Image (cartoon, grey):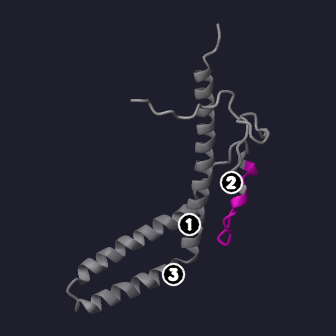
Amino acid sequence: MKEDPNMALMDDISKVAKQVAKEAEHVVGKAVKQAGELTDANRHKIEDALDKAGKFVDSKTDGKFSKQIEHAKDAADKGVAFVAKQKSAHVPPRPGQSRDDDDATGPAASWDDTSVQDSVAHLDGTAPPVGESPYPNPIPPYSPPQS
């Protein structure tokens, strides 16, 4: 029985989609952790800015909305605390990498876009020759129906 070429293509697309999802999960986890580290490291600056903003708005409204401003500041403080807690968030490993291999990030770490996989590769990890598709049955170009 001959294998349907469309099924092979769908299997390939499914494998690539899963790999992209895992890579995205790693990148998002790393960004969340870094946001938490930066928020925690600068928490006092953020809280000072919130206090200043609250006082400014309160002075411009002649204290009319003091309760609402205080309530909003409390909510913002809770949000800052939530983001700061993310400094200890779990960062899933990159596809093909064990948890121990995962690169650690710190509060002063900068984005390293060289770690993002942006080249097309065969599903076995080898790069295709220039001009060759990594898929055994490439999708044909779209031809709109003739009316």
The image's mark for residue 35 is 1
Judge whether residue 85 is colored magenta: no
Q: CA distance from mark 1 to mark 3?
A: 15 Å
Q: Is residue 145 left or right of residue 95?
A: left
Mark found first going from the N terminus, 2 or 1: 1
Mark found first going from the N terminus, 1 or 3: 1
Which marked residue is nearer to the observer: mark 1 or mark 3? 1
Task: Name the amino acid, label 3.
Answer: His
The residue shown at (28%, 92%) is 59
Nearest the camera: 73 or 94?
94
Give the image location of residue 146, x and y in percent. Answer: 43, 30
Q: CA distance from mark 2 to mark 1?
A: 19 Å
| Residue at the spot of label 2 | 116
The span picked out in magenta is: 100-114
Give the image location of residue 10, x and y in percent. Answer: 58, 28
Task: Name the amino acid, label 2.
Answer: Val
Task: Name the amino acid, label 1.
Answer: Ala
| Secondary structure of the residue carrying numbered label 1 | helix
